[in-house]
Image: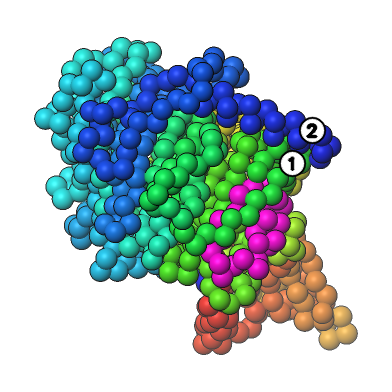
Amino acid sequence: MKLRLSKPPVAAGISVILVLALAAALFAAWPRKIVHDNALTQSVSMIEPAPLDVKPAAPPVYEALSRRLVEYHISVSLVPEKKELHGAESVTWENPGSKPVQELYLHLYPNAFESDNSTFNRESGGKLREDKRTGNSVGGMKLTTIQTEKGDDLSRLTEFVRPDDGNLEDHTLLKVRLLEPVAPGGKVTLRMEFRVQLPEVFARMGYSGDFYMAGQWFPKVAVYEPAGTRGRTEEGWNLHQYHGNSEFYADFGIYDVKIRVPSGYTVAATGFPTKPATEDKTSKTYRFYADDVHDFAWAASPRFVYQEEKFSAPGVPGVKIKLYLDPLHKPLKNRYFQAAKKALTRYSEWYGEYPYSTLSIVVPPAGGNGAGGMEYPTLITAWGASSETPDLSLERVIVHEIGHQWWYGMVASNEFEEAWLDEAFTSYAEDKVMEREYGELPNHPVEAAYITGPEPLQQLSWKYGSHDHYADNVYLRGKLVLNAIERQTGADKMNKVLRAYFDRYKFRHPSTENFQAVVERVTGRSWADFFDAYVYGNLMSDFSVDSIRVQKAEGSTKEMPAYESQILIRKLGGPWPTVPVRIHFADGSTKDIAWSTEASEIQYKLVHSAPVDWVQIDPERTLVLESRVINNHLKAQVDDKQQLRFSLSLQKIIEALMIGVAW
């Protein structure tokens, strides 16, 4: 999610397209368990079985990229006049642990919008980023049936649970007791019917006029973590409600989704269509398939201006970029395509291959910005369209959200508990692309000065003091931590670190400790002090010129004056290997010193023909985690009032700079 503060030859590309077309045809003919039977659809309008219209064939054989623990078959209809989704779902879950499991847990995310007293609304105050909910931003999800594969009713064996805060008015996490335990390696299938009342668009989902965004819209199985996953000592469910700050965590699997919308609507979705959309007099039905993904999202509108371009590059073997534009931004299509191509090229070059055949970009209308700036597997949303010609924020949000395809989409960290492993990594990578392709440089000193409430990066997303503190730390401070590692290792080594991390942990849900282990393995040294201070701890760098004392040196004469200057420098924050210090004398000469900071302070004594008149720590601004620059500089022979005025003036300058910072 983006915070907004203000080449193979042609023949090879054709071959890839032919293979994909053949795979789609085979998939359409592949017999499988489909949820669309009469028992499930009798109370759900506009949902009917999808007949197989070709002779069954063997499924395509290829190596799965992930351990596919869930398989979803969903049929959903959009009912615009009611602002509702009517759905039927069959989900099969595999037990990845070593013990029998007696219950399943389902995330019912739309229930975050059912009242002012949901945990999400209590914590967010009805605001996410700069978007506020309206009086119509009320929604929810109802399970009308829940059954076993054999048709046994499980509705009486369900209950809402609130493991994080005990809020009895929160209904975003549902426990389902099973009739029989699921053995290790065994599977269980549940069948459900559900209805979703869509809110006026807010916090990633809902409607704006005739634009609809379905994000986190279906009953979704929680993650069961085997022992050893992210350092877990005992296996069990990873259970959290939907919080004001948190995003999501899910297992990889297969999605087969049929979407019915009114005639004239166009649908953008995760994955690829298995066959052309079919139409009758009143409706149009799409069918999409995706595998090795951990979520499925879609958007619909009768006003989408659809454009597509095929693209390939080293690490991007062949992808169809699909652009669903609001009409206001039709003249800007080339900017969207170019940003997507630049991002795909650089991320694949630096971190690893983009393995999917599609990438969809949805541009919401001006009133739909609550759905903008968000990532889903193979689908992203841009900022809402406006009549004004946008600046590079158009490209930046596309670059950012495509970056999530690597860190959120494939590495797939637990965003409930370690959100920085996605947001900070994506923000770091985004800056690299924007610098390389658009010449836009980040301002690390100003960004560091913005961090006024540092908190540990490895903590529950809702435990931060406020949404601002969450954003400052998870996005900004986390990004600066990665830049700090780069400053100490060099850019080439840092690229090796990130590529090794991605290569080792794609499709595996890693932890912060896993990332630290990769850093240490690639660089060949311990980073324990650094991680303890800046990742597991809440420190920033803070080096202070505490005092300057100047006196005539012994033996000084009028003809040959000499001055003894004593300078005290202290370490008040986290560690840094070597700190540059510049000492300036009254005669205009300077002396640069590199302080090795093992001790908490150091005092320099210098004899020179002129007195020291000021001292500056880090004059070139290389300490990217230095947040309190007001104590980096000190003038000699300044009385307390003058020194205070100097510090306050510098602080005012920083505050003025921060007014112009946009995300």
Q: In the displayed structure, would residue 436 be above or below residue 513?
A: below
* Residue, disc 1: 312
Assess disc 1: are there few (<14), some (14-19) or many (≥20) residues with their C-alpha within 10 Å of its C-alpha: many
**Height in image: 286 above or below 81?**
above
Helix, strand or loop at disc 1?
strand
The magenta segment = 321-344
x, y percent for residue 61: 59, 17
Magenta stretch mostly in which secondary structure? helix
Q: Amino acid at mark 2?
A: Ala
330 or 143: which is nearer to us? 330
- Judging depth in this view, the residue of 453 and 393 nearest the camera is 393
Image coordinates of residue 116 in percent, x first then y, are 20, 60
Numbered disc 2: secondary structure: helix
Q: Nearer the viewer, mark 1 or mark 2?
A: 2
First along the sequence among labels 1 and 2: 2
Where is residue 25? Give x, y as percent.
Answer: 57, 27
Q: Do we see residue 429 in this rendering? A: no
Task: Specify the quadrant that holds the C terminus.
Answer: bottom right
Crowding near the residue tagged with mark 2, few <14, some 14–19, many ≥20 C-alpha atoms within 10 Å:
some
Can residue 269 be seen from the camera position used here?
A: yes
Q: Is residue 430 left or right of residue 279?
A: right
